C-alpha cells in the first residue's frame, strides 16, 4: 500500500505510428486450400480427411485470412496471424538483416509471393518470419528496408554524437585535473 501523499505517476501508453499496413491478397485463401488438399492426398490418413476439409475448411481459411495483420511502424514490423492459436510478432527494424522475395511455380500459379524476414541473432538457417500473399510485396519490401535504413542511420548518428560528447567530457576532466595539479604545485601539496 502506498502511504505517501504523492500520487503515483504512470507513463502514458504511446501507440506506434503506422507508416504502412500490408494488405493480403484474397487468392491466399485458394492457395491454403490447395496446400491442405495436396498434403492430404500424399498421406494415407489425410485422404480420409479431405471431405471434412471440403466442408469445414472454407470457414477456417476465411477466419485465418481475416486474422492476418501486418504493419510497418517507425521502429518495428508487427505481424499477427492465427485462428485457434494466435501468434503476434514484433520485429525491431534495426534487427532486420534482409527481406527475401520468393516466387515459386505454385505461388506464381496463384499470383502470390512470399517475403522472408531474416533477423540478427536468429537461431536457425533460413528466414525468421515469412509473410505470404502481401499485395504489392515488392513495394512493401522496399518500404520496410527504407525505414530500417532510416532507423539504423539515426542510431549510428546518435552513437557518434554520444562519442563526441564523451570526448568533450574527457577533455574537460583533463583540464580540471591539470588545473588541480597547478594549484597543488603552487601551494606545495
Image (cartoon, rainbow, N blue to C red):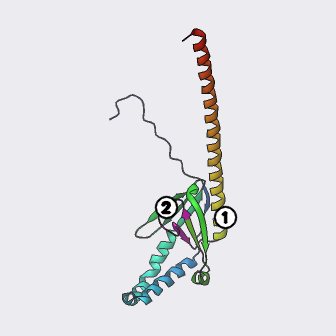
Q: Nearer the viewer, residue 37 or 165?
A: 165
Q: Residue under circle 2? A: 89
- The reply to whether discs 1 and 2 touch (Cβ–Cβ < 8 Å) is no
Quarter-wise, where is residue 112 in the image?
bottom right
Whether residue 76 appears in this view of the structure is no
Label 1 secondary element: helix
Quarter that holds the C terminus: top right
Q: Which mark is residue 142?
A: 1
Q: Position of residue 176 (x, y in %)?
A: 61, 22
Residue 90 position (above or below residue 139): above
Q: Residue at x 49, y 75 (%)?
A: 62
Q: Residue at x 62, y 52 (%)?
A: 152
Residue 41 position (above or below residue 120): below
Residue 69 position (above or below residue 156): below
Q: Position of residue 107 (x, y in %)?
A: 58, 80
Boundaries of the magenta span: 118-135
Q: State left or right for residue 135 relative to residue 85.
A: right
Q: State left or right for residue 158 relative to residue 49.
A: right
Magenta-colored segment: predominant secondary structure: loop
Amino acid at each position: 500500500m502506498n502511504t505517501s501523499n504523492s500520487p503515483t505517476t504512470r507513463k502514458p501508453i504511446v501507440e506506434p505510428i503506422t507508416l504502412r499496413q500490408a494488405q493480403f491478397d484474397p487468392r491466399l485463401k485458394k492457395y491454403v486450400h490447395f496446400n491442405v488438399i495436396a498434403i492430404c492426398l500424399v498421406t494415407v490418413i489425410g485422404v480420409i480427411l479431405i471431405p471434412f476439409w471440403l466442408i469445414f475448411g472454407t470457414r477456417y481459411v476465411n477466419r485465418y485470412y481475416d486474422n492476418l495483420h501486418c504493419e510497418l511502424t517507425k521502429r518495428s514490423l508487427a505481424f499477427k496471424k492465427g485462428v485457434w492459436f494466435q501468434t503476434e510478432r514484433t520485429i525491431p527494424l534495426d534487427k532486420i538483416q534482409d527481406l527475401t522475395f520468393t516466387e515459386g511455380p505454385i505461388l506464381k500459379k496463384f499470383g502470390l509471393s512470399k517475403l522472408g524476414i531474416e533477423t540478427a541473432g536468429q537461431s536457425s538457417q533460413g528466414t525468421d518470419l515469412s509473410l505470404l500473399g502481401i499485395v504489392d510485396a515488392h513495394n512493401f519490401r522496399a518500404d520496410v528496408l527504407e525505414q530500417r535504413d532510416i532507423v539504423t542511420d539515426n542510431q549510428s548518428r546518435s552513437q557518434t554524437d554520444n562519442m563526441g560528447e564523451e570526448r568533450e567530457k574527457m577533455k574537460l576532466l583533463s583540464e580540471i585535473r591539470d588545473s588541480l595539479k597547478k594549484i597543488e604545485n603552487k601551494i606545495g601539496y
